[in-house]
Image: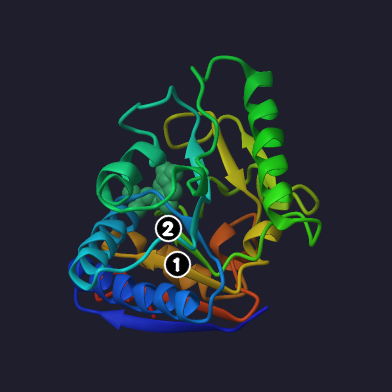
Amino acid sequence: MSEPEIVRTIDAEQLAQSAASRLAKLIVSAETEGRDFHLVLTGGGVGIRTLAALRDEALACGMKWSHVHLWWGDERFLPEGDPERNETQAREALIADIDIPAHQVHPMPSSDGTDHAEAERAATTYSQALAVAARGKGPVPEFDVCLLGLGPDAHVASLFPGLPGVHEDEAAVVAVHDSPKPPPTRISLTLCAIGTARQVWVLAAGESKAEAVRLGLSDASVDRAPVAGARGAERTVFWLDQAASAQL
Ligand SMILES: O=C1O[C@H](COP(=O)(O)O)[C@@H](O)[C@H](O)[C@H]1O
């Protein structure tokens, strides 16, 4: 588990561009080294902005995507194509404009969100897809970078304070019910799956995230602040704008 580093930027736009630029360099390096690159995507305001900046950077430098796999850290359990799905937003911001093989895009399952058991099955389905990609080397493939947005309540992915998902220490994926942020049913990677990523990047912009950032860099319990348990195996980077770093 790595100690968090902080990258300070002026505003959300500069944050998105800086994170996207570093991400693009890592993706290009993996291609040069002849290895796959597994990237975990996030939803949320600055998260989607970062994906749009990555698209711009990729198009500007003719970046290749044939070695890249895209996964999701969490999903709002809604019908396919729903504008609130993190997948839909990522497709609009990035995936629709890049030349990535369709079978290397791994969205979390979609649903009408009304059947409690359906979300549990969806979590199992995604765990299985991750295990297959890991080729027997563990429960999930080696994630190179896991992007995480941050909620004002200190949630990451769809792991919310006080809900049981934050304490899951065996399964890689959980169904989340009664989320305080709509929609109530979600699917999420767990902190133990997130913690296998070589690098975990927490992206936070705006005053409403300042307290969550402070808690995330403290020794707060994950029950109070799930972000405090989001740490990468090699590096953990908090990408912050001025407003989000106001309480540090
Ligand atoms: O619902 C979600 O919220 C968080 C944070 O979103 P933001 O709009 O407050 O930045 C996001 O990280 C997560 O992926 C998403 O499902």
Q: Is 40 located above or below residue 103 in the figure? A: below
Disc 2 target residue: 150
Mark 1–mark 2 Cα distance, whole angstroms, equals 7 Å
Q: Are marks 1 and 2 in contact (CB under 8 Å)?
A: yes
**Residue in the picture at 26% in, 63% down:** 206
Q: In the rendered structure, which amino acid carries the disc numbered 2?
A: Leu
Q: In the depicted view, which residue is nearer to us: 222 or 200?
A: 200
Density class for disc 2 (Cα within 10 Å; few <14, some 14-19, many ≥20) is: many
**Residue in the picture at 54% in, 15% down:** 114
Q: Is residue 246 visible?
A: no
Q: Is 123 located above or below residue 243 in the figure? A: above
Q: Position of residue 136 (x, y in %)?
A: 81, 56
**Residue in the picture at 57% in, 48% down:** 159
Label 2 secondary element: loop
Q: In the depicted view, which residue is nearer to us: 10 or 33?
A: 33
Left or right, 19 with respect to 202, comes to left
Whether label 1 lies within 8 Å of ligand 1 gets the answer: no
Q: Position of residue 183 (x, y in %)?
A: 44, 29
Disc 1 target residue: 202
Q: In the depicted view, which residue is nearer to us: 161 or 86?
A: 86
Whether label 2 lies within 8 Å of ligand 1 gets the answer: yes
Q: Is 164 located above or below residue 109 in the figure? A: below
